[in-house]
Image: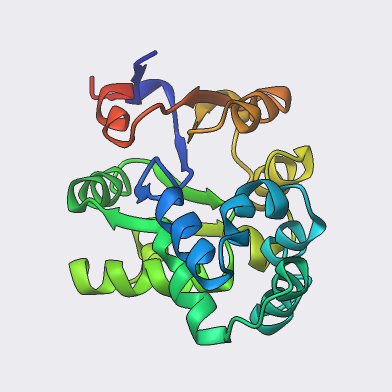
Amino acid sequence: MPKRLSEIDTIIFDLGEVIVDLDPQAVIEEFSRLTSGRGKDLRELIVGSPYLYRYETGQIDDAQFVDEINQLFDSQISLSDFEYAWNLMIKGISSGRLELMQKLMETHRVLILSNTNAMHERYFDSMVISLAGKPMKDFSHTAYYSHLIGYRKPNADIYEFIIEDQGFDPKRSLFLDDKIENIEAARGVGINAEQVQFPDQIFEILIHD
């Protein structure tokens, strides 16, 4: 539902499908090509394995992640080919959403809370720098990326961590994310949360007084 900005002090943005447009099918198609068809099951195999969790919580680096996925698919994808395919996930970033975040920083505490990884961070930062002259994190007061803080949504500890780190009142905060499990987890620790079902919906949710 729409949220009056006067009712909140802190706005927390997820990135994927909230600020950043994603294209998971493009990733699957490229990995399928690189693995002679085995990559068509990429989503199920990676999501159901511990590799992505370890990568997105900073427990393993780029090379280790690629090695483990190569073992999973019995393939020999180079690091550069893997990174190209992996980054096809990031389809684009709207300047209008970035401008909204920048404007909100004048009146509210703006945070980013994203399950992400080093490859994706480098890639979306390069896109944002080309678009706006500065990296994504500069469109918030603090950016919390899972691979840098060691926590990952929807575990409760990631929300508890940012509340303690920032010292904000969860009742006067709003978290925007596309995944219902992340929304429910945030609500479980007292954060107001709304599911974003398409990226430009944030303009409808965040209503100025």
In percent of width and height, residue 34 lies at 52, 72
Q: Is residue 209 left or right of residue 31?
A: left
Q: Residue furthest front?
A: 36
Is 135 in front, or is 68? 68
Task: Kindly identify the residue that appears in the image at 23 percent across and 46 percent down.
Answer: 103
Task: Kindly identify the residue that appears in the image at 34 percent across and 26 percent down.
Answer: 5
In percent of width and height, residue 207 lies at 26, 22
Question: Does the rendering let one see residue 169?
Answer: yes
Residue 4 vertical placement versus 186 (above, below):
above
Q: How is the image coloured?
A: rainbow
Q: Residue furthest top?
A: 1
Is 192 in front, or is 49? 49
Q: In which quadrant of the rendered image does the N terminus lie?
A: top left
Q: In which quadrant of the rendered image does the C terminus lie?
A: top left
Task: Kindly identify the residue that appears in the image at 59 percent across and 81 percent down.
Answer: 77
Is 102 in front, or is 19? 19
Quarter where residue 104 is shown:
top left
Is 56 in front, or is 26? 26
Residue 78 vertical placement versus 105 (above, below):
below
In percent of width and height, residue 164 lies at 71, 47
Residue 194 vertical placement versus 98 (above, below):
above
Q: How many marks?
A: 0
Question: Does the rendering let one see residue 133?
Answer: no
In percent of width and height, residue 107 lies at 31, 41
